[in-house]
Amino acid sequence: MRNRDIRLIWNIAAAIVLLFVGPPLLGVGGSILGAKFASLFFSDDASPESGYLSLSVKLMLENAELREMAAKSRLYRSMLNYTRMPDVTALVGRVMYRSEGLVRGDLIVDRGSDHGVYPGAVCITSRGLAGIVTSVDATSSTVVPITSPSIHVSCITATTGSLGILGSQSGGRLRLEYVDSSSKPETGETVLTSRFGGVYPEGIVVGRVESVSEGARGLDLSLEVSPAVDFERVNEVLILLSEENAQ
């Protein structure tokens, strides 16, 4: 068997494996990664058979990108279902870099005042609350995540209705403080933003109760909360823009 035939067989195998194994392992992006990687095997001066396969891979790549766009559209719609804020518009912001660290570091996104972003705009992901915009220039904004010590959020647990103030602790973990002991919060409960505080829209997922302990004063409870958002993997946020605040 000639070397060209052997290479063609390997090309076909690589394309099939990466295109069909990629999505289960990596999601929609896996098929795109697989197609792009497989396309590297093909050169412009290859044989007609290889050229046909190269065209097939390119078509698969285009289909994968269309599927990704459709998936993102569904994803953004699900993001908007979190909030009950009236007259809200949403703007996708891509994370360009982090100021420091993967968990507590501020997120610098590629949307600014030219796009209607303003300080105080709330940011979410498909999993829940990400943070809040603290500063804006023309084409970028700084988003401080809820894992930052400077952020405090009024929250409520979904099952028992236990109210408290959410803040961060070491390692990017969150803690819901000043919870009334008579509310009897339970581990495993979902923690949501509450209607109190006036900053964050009501009903956005924040995390889940991991443990319940006595508060520092001995008169209330303190809840350890695992954040819903994996801040090490955030590469896009949805910036919620209120028409009232934008004016």
Image: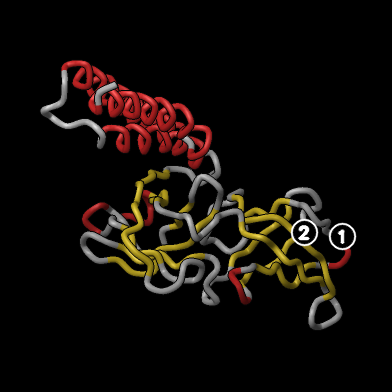
Query: Is residue 229 among the parts visible in the rendering?
Result: yes
Are discs 2 and 1 less than 8 Å apart at CB? yes
Residue at coordinates 35% horizontally, 46% vertically from top-left? 91
Mark closer to the chain start, 2 or 1:
2
Which amino acid type is shown beneath numbered disc 1? Lys
Query: Is residue 239 among the parts visible in the rendering?
Result: no
- Depicted 204 relative to depicted 231: above or below: above
Question: What is the quadrant of residue 141 in the picture?
Answer: bottom left
Q: Please state which of residues 67 and 186 is positioned toward the viewer in this rendering.
A: 67
- Depicted 106 relative to depicted 195: above or below: below
Residue at coordinates 79% horizontally, 64% vertically from top-left? 211
Q: Please state which of residues 114 and 124 is positioned toward the viewer in this rendering.
A: 124
Residue at coordinates 86% horizontally, 67% vertically from top-left? 181
Identify the disc placed on residue 162.
2
Instruction: Using residue 126 as the reference point, say whether residue 159 is left or right of it.
Output: right
Report crowding for label 1: few under 14, some 14 to 19, many 20 or more residues within 10 A (C-alpha).
Answer: few
Q: Which residue is mark 1?
A: 184
Which amino acid type is shown beneath numbered disc 2? Ser
What is the quadrant of the C terminus in the image? bottom left
Instruction: Using residue 196 as the reference point, say whether residue 210 is left or right of it.
Output: right
Query: Tag 1, which secondary structure?
Result: loop
Q: Please state which of residues 67 and 43 is positioned toward the viewer in this rendering.
A: 43
- Depicted 32 relative to depicted 188: above or below: above
- Depicted 146 relative to depicted 93: above or below: below
